[in-house]
Image (cartoon, grey):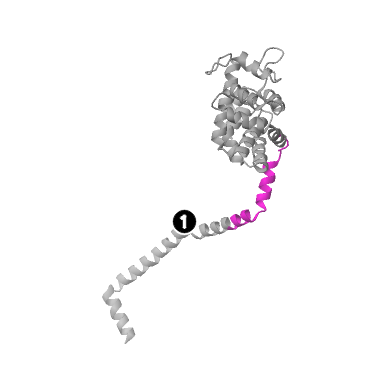
Amino acid sequence: MTAIWNNFDDGSKKLEYYADVITALGAKTASSSSEIAQGLSKFAAIADTVGLSYEYASASIATVVAETRQSADTVGNAFKALFARLQSLKLGETLEDGVGLTKYTQALAAVGVQVLDINGNLRDADDILNDLGDKWQDISSAQKAALAQTVAGQRQYSQMIALMDNWDKVKANVGIAEQSGGTLQSQQDIYAESWEAASKRVKASLQSIYQDLLDDKFFIGFLNGLSSVLDGIDRFIDRIGGLKTVISSLGALAT
């Protein structure tokens, strides 16, 4: 949550909103909120710099983890590599596989997706991916493979394909993210009424009683009192002549 907050917060939303989004997506998909948060932490910094919103980023990681059941770390690192390519192109660099901005834009333009805006600046990743997702089902398998390798690189192209093949689910999950306000509190309210929560409250109460019974101050006072009693017995025995006198007295009583 720290990584998410540091990279996506623009001052317009409270921290609870970011928790609401991953809680809602965790409840609605086959991924969990912890998996979504873990995956996001891998690429949050890069996602923000290339214009990938929190809603699209969280919906993308939730969808791919849910559909492929790969670990959140694997998917998150794949997205990090994918968006790092876009970040490098934004800086005017040529990628390690020889892909430059010109080749990148031409590959996407061939399927009707514009990478640059009218001023020649790189468009936000939200817009590029959304346009590509809308075109994805209309292109051939060979085009998909070639395009995915250009966009994501040889190592991560399969994750790009998984993302685009499930783009309808990504968009649906973006909608869930955008309407997620209050989900965390709602889930907490449901949990508070559950049997598990009730049993934990009883357990907590019993532990509190146990701790009160074993309170240090109580035992310190008790032991101090017992020590005083024993000191009194010791002084009494000493005054009457010690153990010999006690035994003689007990013998006399017995007789």
Mark 1 — residue? Answer: 216
Q: Is residue 71 above or below residue 105?
A: below
> Residue reaching furthest left?
244
What residue is rendered at 26% in x and 76% in y? 244
**Quadrant of the frame with the N terminus:** top right
Position in image of residue 107 (x %, y %):
64, 18
Tell me which corner region of the image, top left, top right, bottom left or bottom right, holds residue 69: top right
> Residue reaching furthest top?
119
Residue nearest the viewer, comparing 206 with 234: 206
Q: Is 37 within the magenta?
A: no
Q: Which residues are magenta?
A: 177-202
Asked whether the viewer can see residue 166, the reply is yes
Position in image of residue 206 (x %, y %):
56, 59
Q: Is residue 235 above or below residue 193?
A: below
Q: Is residue 14 above or below residue 154?
A: below
Position in image of residue 140 (x %, y %):
67, 26
**Quadrant of the frame with the C terminus:** bottom left
Determine the secondary structure under disc 1.
helix
> Residue reaching furthest bottom?
255
